[in-house]
Image (tube, grey):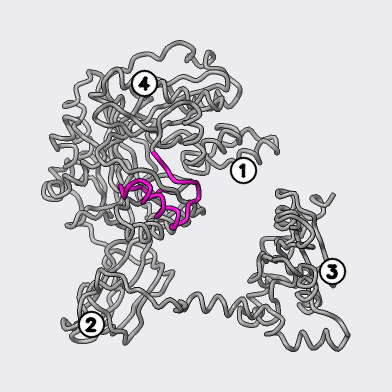
Amino acid sequence: ALHPGYGLLSERADLAEACANSGVLFVGPDAETLRKQGDKVSARSLALTAGVPTLNGSGPDASAAEIHAFFDAQGAMPLMIKAVNGGGGRGMRVVRTHDDIDTGFAQAQAEAKSAFGDGALYAERFLPSVRHIEVQIIGDGANVTHLWERDCSVQRRHQKVIELAPAPHLASATRTAILEAAIAIGRACSYRGLGTVEFLVEQTGSFYFIETNPRIQVEHTITEEITGFDLVEIQLALASGASLADVGLDQPPVLPTGFSLQTRITTETLGPDGTFLPTGGKLTTYNAPSGPGVRIDGYAYSGYSTNPNFDSLLAKLIVHEKSGDLVRLFAKAERALSEFQIDGLDTNIGFLRSLLRLPVVTEWAVDVRTLDAQMQELIARQGGQDRFFAAEVGAEVAAVDVHIGADVLRAPMQAMIREIHVAVGDIVAKGQEIAVIEAMKMQHRILAETGGVVAQVFVDAGDTIATNAAVLSYMPDDSLKAISSEPEIPAPDHIRGDLTALQDRIARTLDENRPRAVARRRDRNQTTTREIISALCEGGDFHEYGQLVLAGQRRKLGLDALIDVSPADGIVTGVGAVNADRFAEGRSQVALLAYDSTVMAGTQGFFGHLKTDRMIEVARDQGLATVFFTEGGGGRPNDDDFAQTVQSGLKVTTFAEFA
């Protein structure tokens, strides 16, 4: 059996399908259910089919232009741009104007690609003052039940900070309607396993489905505390074929016992401007609280060193108050936080303690905007008396020699440098974007604090830097104006530098820029591969796949040499129209593959094999005929970039697919 964990791997339909095909038991819903529930757009369609209200939304995988049009159609009301896949608050941006859409779209797409490997986005109507309520559903493929709801309304940047079960102050009729809606969605896909159905709830009691998480979630712990069920044990039993009756859930759910709260201890601190800054370092001491009603789920240990490429979560604090007294619950949680003993790096414990003492939180008069609205008060009052004497924390930052009179721009957090936009000698204005950094798969901009001239650059793209590490130094010049908030409108005929570079790179694969290779074909009275494809597709289009792929010999020849000697890795592939003048539009399309004997004698390279398999897959999925020109020299033995990891070429699916 394979348990995919709490992460987004558990929502991968292809993984569930591969397990099924290999005889491995996948602990979670089947591939068909994951396809229906694993992305937000498909889940919305399923909810509508089940009669559950949803927010107005755009189409799936929407472009920026389509979101602009949807914005106008909604009367210029605020929208939420969201990643189709994934979760955790990543790939989400609220937009209120057309200008916001372009910026928000680019940022959300970059985050989604980094976090989930998929930049598909869509948009839906944004509701500001709502509660975020989610329902724990459990199904055995025939029946679906629930184990009550959780309130996740205290959030920052769409990420949950406090989770509470069951939801306090929720009207009985609203609770019943939400629970029934969640079960209806589960039944609509014959749900098997554990899942969470999420809703936005207005003060009026109106509610809207937003997404399903077809997996066990990080906050499942508080449901376990109020019901007494071990959800992981139930999940494993259901995956093994058990029914709801077998796990004791065939009767109406037992009433919850008291309230349970979860909050997350992370390697972050709250800055003076309200920004959460990832910290880094090594845990020299780690001791967690314990006692009746206090549970810790975590992985931290003395000696652990942080990594900015991964989530900053150290531990989850789960507190249960059987009496149902919210005041006692929050007091117990705050006291437990004070009993953590953590030395070596900074955490968000001070912020959490301040949050748990806020009257608006202890009375649970909250919505998804509460944290933002209370941020200044939280900054002013964060912290409290610890139960231990803590060592002074301060990560050492490497010293740099700075020119006399220069100011230093420093990193606000431990992160990876994604982009550097300036070089020594560049003139920068106040507010100009200097660099883009990434921490926990979320991107942040570093802006110039004043105008000046860049004197030194201390980092490169790809570097991992500590909090307060020097990024660059510059000679300040207050006479330089601040960057205008009005975007510069480029000339209609302007071509960006990166696009020009791409066009030039594509051009180097074409016959007109390979005169020596073409001359060799002419000497033999032969046409080139691209001429053959052009003649075959005369009167129609040819869309090439993998045009910029190169031979797997970078360690031996280097990138520049490979661009010249191995265009397309010796095989031109794509989809083209043959006899387009004789068939209706779309009926003339075929998958085209043609070895290029001018590239390494037409031998089959490592990446060329992958291109071949991809085109056969496209032909199969789209029902296309395949035209394959096989002039070439057979296998290529010296693609050795992967010699240490690939021992044979038997992983390719070409022959099996053709068979």
Upstream in sequence: badge 1 or badge 2: 1
Alpha carbon distance from label 1 to label 4: 34 Å
In the rendering, which numbered label is found on residue 14? 1
Q: Depth check: 439 or 115 in front?
A: 115
Upstream in sequence: badge 1 or badge 4: 1
Residue 221 picture location, percent across and down: 37, 30
- The answer to the question of whether label 1 and label 2 lie on touching residues, with beta carbons closer than 8 A, is no
Q: Say which quarter of the image contains residue 616.
A: bottom right
Alpha carbon distance from label 4 to label 3: 65 Å
Tell how many labels.
Answer: 4
- The answer to the question of whether label 3 and label 2 lie on touching residues, with beta carbons closer than 8 A, is no
Please, what secondary structure does the residue beneath circle 4 have? helix
In the rendering, which numbered label is found on residue 634? 3
Mark 3: give few (<14), some (14-19) or many (20+) Cα within 10 Å. few
Amino acid at pointer 1: Asp
Upstream in sequence: badge 3 or badge 2: 2
| Residue drawn 38% across the image and 13% down it | 254
What residue span does the magenta drawing correspond to?
56-82
Q: Mark 4 points at which residue?
A: 177
| Residue drawn 52% across the image and 79% down it | 500
Residue 489 seen in the figure: yes
| Number of the front mark, 3 or 2 | 2
